[in-house]
Image (cartoon, rainbow, N blue to C red):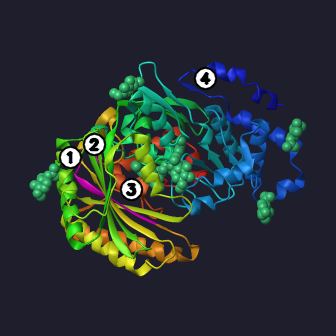
Amino acid sequence: MRLLSLVALPILSRVAAAASFSPYTLDDVQGDISTYLNHNATQQARAVSNFGCDLACGFLAFTLPHTVAFRNSSIYDFQENRYWSQQQEFTRPTCRFSPTRAEDVSLAILTFRVTQCKFAVKSGGHGAFSGASNIQDGVTVDLIHLTDVKLSKDKKVASIGAGNTWYNVYEKLTPQNLTVVGGRVSPIGVGGLTLGGGISFFSARYGWACDNVHNYQVVLADGSIRDVHPKSCNKDLYWALRGGGNNFAVVTRLDLETYPQGDMWAGSQTYINTPETSKAINQAFEDFAIKSPEDDYAQIITAYAYAQTQGIYVIASDLQYGKPVANPPILQNFTAIPGAIMDTLRIVDLPSLTQEFNATNPYGFRKTYWTYTFKNSAALMDEIVAIYMEEVEKVKDAPGIVPSAVFQPITTSMTKHFAKNGGNPLGLEGQGPLTLVNIDISWTKISDDTRIFAAAQAIVDRSVAAAKARGLDHPYLYQNYASQKQDVFASYGEANLAKLRSISKKYDPDQVLQRLQPGYFKLH
Ligand SMILES: Cc1cc2nc3c(=O)[nH]c(=O)nc-3n(C[C@H](O)[C@H](O)[C@H](O)COP(=O)(O)OP(=O)(O)OC[C@H]3O[C@@H](n4cnc5c(N)ncnc54)[C@H](O)[C@@H]3O)c2cc1C
Ligand SMILES: *[C@@H]1O[C@H](CO)[C@@H](O)[C@H](O)[C@H]1NC(C)=O
Ligand SMILES: *[C@@H]1O[C@H](CO)[C@@H](O)[C@H](O)[C@H]1NC(C)=O
Ligand SMILES: *[C@@H]1O[C@H](CO)[C@@H](O)[C@H](O)[C@H]1NC(C)=O
Ligand SMILES: *[C@@H]1O[C@H](CO)[C@@H](O)[C@H](O)[C@H]1NC(C)=O
Ligand SMILES: *[C@@H]1O[C@H](CO)[C@@H](O)[C@H](O)[C@H]1NC(C)=O
């Protein structure tokens, strides 16, 4: 009867301070599950096809009371509603497991191994496609309770539970006149954004989110809990986590570098998409991407969209400046473009700015996200905008459709920070300026899925062909914007992919996180 030893938790809290420890072993959990099975499972229960996950849910519910929510319970329904896309929201796991400590995650991973139950891990739930952070008939580990935000004594590091939204983090740090390098839309999760890269309003100054992690607390496939930082003996794992997604560990806490930050000048100028305006904005974009190193407080996002109710194409020119200074010279080529029909540029604090972006990214719709990258060129942008509009014409009658093509520069001011702390696996160190594109479409009816996916795919394929024809193509695919049909890790380059695979074999010899956690981007 090892069940008793499992609940003898005071022992655990004594060792919890160590940099690496294993609260449970696979053998112990195997033994406990056998005991549980003998007491609790009838022959009838054992005969059902999904018995592995039923067993995992039952065992975790018995061992860690209040962590498991079953189908049709109010907690289950509440958590299922907290996905951004409908495809994820409509995915129904056997149960949802909500750990409160890294030790709970350790027990869960070993339980999934013993029962061979497939699982997914959710932080903010903004992964767009089905299975990214929810799993049909498996167990979803929802990090919803890992929401601590603690500043170190010297205030140089913020320890952030991996289930936080960026809004919660910024709300805690802004009164201290501090920030971390994180997401730009309030409800995005700390976990997914940082593990895929993470573009922030401050990335020209400090690099992407993954470049500013002081330490990751992780749970490995063997159930051990480890601290992973650039000076640790597992610094290879640190490198892999900076863009490696969900392939290496479940991250339970991120200790992020903090930076002084007060109010900003930021907002959005909206234009009707005429050929003249579009040309002027694309030229300003190309020039800005080159000039960015002259003032790395500035960042931009240029979004092309179609407004269905008015039947017009529009351009949202989002400008951000990291100081409370209106209309700085670096952004004046944008603000000089006449004809804005809406303008929200103002002095603003970071939490409010992320709320403004949340308002234009509502929950509850069908969604698809795609990406590609090309070398900085206004002429190519003009051509891609034309391709985007041609393809949107074919689907613009779909109820509720909001199709957009979003351009962001990956500047040399950003990529020079990719070398920090031993580098990252993205394959972009020192490169640029590049243009990152995100094709982002939402709509309401499942019956439109097929033709909208086809339109998105056509925009991507035709744009990549146009870039190749001009010799301006680039292989990089940004994980956080990619479709499940895109091969993200191959785009990091052969050498980086080989290194990622060997690090995965080293820390997860049985490839548990590849086999039992099938969702999102995998190394094979
Ligand atoms: C409205 C919107 C705005 C966005 N804005 C930005 C932006 O400003 N900058 C930017 O770079 N990207 C942005 N993105 C993209 C965003 O970074 C990705 O969608 C990211 O995956 C979201 O992370 P999440 O934790 O919310 O999602 P989730 O769906 O919870 O997670 C995404 C993936 O990461 C894995 N994962 C999450 N947490 C952990 C963990 N702790 N341990 C192991 N695996 C984990 C999940 O298993 C899943 O596979 C935006 C996306 C949307 C929809
Ligand atoms: C499972 O068995 C244990 C040990 O006999 C018992 O205490 C517990 O109530 C049972 N739980 C369920 C859900 O049947
Ligand atoms: C959940 O509720 C739905 C509708 O009320 C019902 O059809 C379904 O069988 C229930 N599922 C479980 C597991 O209780
Ligand atoms: C933050 O900055 C404001 C404005 O400069 C100042 O009034 C306030 O005291 C600062 N707060 C902290 C905690 O340093
Ligand atoms: C502004 O536009 C001019 C003319 O195209 C260009 O030469 C200049 O570099 C641009 N400045 C910035 C800061 O982008
Ligand atoms: C973001 O907007 C949604 C509405 O689409 C709202 O329910 C949610 O509370 C907002 N999130 C945050 C963190 O403000």
- Disc 4, SS: loop
C-beta proximity under 8 Å, tags 2 and 1: yes
Q: Residue 19 got which mark? A: none
- Ligand 4, by image quadrant, is top left
User: Which residue is under mark 3?
Assistant: 490
Residue at (48, 42) in percent of width and height: 167
Q: Is the residue 133 above or below the residue 456 in the image?
A: above
Dot 2 falls on a residue whose secondary structure is helix
Beta carbon at label 3 within 8 Å of ligand 1: no
Q: Nearer the viewer, residue 280 or 424?
A: 280
* Position above or below: 27 against 449: above
Which of 424 and 272 lies nearest the eye of the viewer? 272
Q: Quadrant of residue 123?
A: top right
Q: Which residues are magenta?
A: 428-441
Q: Mark 3 or 4 closer to N-term?
A: 4
Q: Which residue is mark 4?
A: 16
Residue 239 drawn in magenta: no
The residue identified by callout 1 is 292
Which percent across, then down, holds residue 449? 53, 73
